[in-house]
Image (cartoon, grey):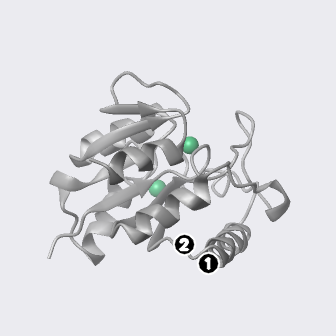
Amino acid sequence: MKVKTVFLDRDGVINVKAPEGDYIKSLKEFRFLPGAVDAIHLLNINNWRVIIITNQRGIARQLMTMHDLQTIHSFMEEELHKHNAHVDDIFICPHEKGTCHCRKPDIGLFLQAEKKIPVDKSKSWMIGDSKSDIEAGRNFGIYTIAVANPIAMADKRFPDLLSAVNFLINC
Ligand SMILES: [Mg+2]
Ligand SMILES: [Zn+2]
């Protein structure tokens, strides 16, 4: 069975993003954005599969390790669980630009998710704050929502994740 899925970018959607050119490299740099945990909980209770797909080039640049990233994600998941929220999966591109087929706007991370559980593309959405997120969603063939930045090519635009999710659960 194909499953309706919401793909979330991480930095700038779930947590405060690092300054341009920098990365969230350690726990002390990770801060949830207001409403993000509630938004994920709302997706969970409305039967969406929730998947994070995130470019983390800081690993290729050796500014952080995969272990650092896993520490951050363990913390993030623990905090979500405390609020009865969860993500179903997290897919990461740790590569340098132009060296792989998974870095958004390529669709390799979506294909990894699709391999585990087929995605109902007619009911699925990509939510991101960057043009590459929106391009990636379009390349995969799902609907797109831009948050924080009003990216013109997105199907919808909202100020933050919670308002985007409130739209999704009511449409
Ligand atoms: Mg982002
Ligand atoms: Zn990659």
Relative side of 38 to 101, left or right: right
Residue at 53% x, 33% y is: 159
Query: Which residue was labeled with disc 1?
Result: 81
Relative side of 15 to 164, left or right: right
Residue at 17% x, 70% y is: 2
Amino acid carrying mark 2 in the image: Ala
Q: Position of residue 166 (x, y in %)?
A: 42, 48
Check contact, mark 1 vs mark 2: CB within 8 A: yes
How would you rate the neighbour count of disc 1 (Cα within 10 Å): few for under 14, some for 14-19, many for 20 or more? Answer: some
Residue at 22% x, 64% y is: 119
Q: Quick check: 70 above or below 92? A: below
Relative side of 166 to 80, left or right: left
Is residue 94 something that shows in the picture?
Answer: no
Extreme residue in the right direction: 28
Secondary structure under tag 1 reads: helix
Is residue 136 something that shows in the picture?
Answer: yes
Relative side of 131 to 13, left or right: left
Q: Position of residue 76 (x, y in %)?
A: 67, 68
Give 104 or 134, whichever is nearer the viewer: 134
Q: Quick check: 150 above or below 15? A: above
Q: Position of residue 63 (x, y in %)?
A: 76, 54
Give 27 or 67, whichever is nearer the viewer: 27
Q: CA distance from mark 1 to mark 2?
A: 5 Å
Query: Which residue was labeled with disc 2?
Result: 85
Residue at 23% x, 69% y is: 3
Amino acid carrying mark 1 in the image: His
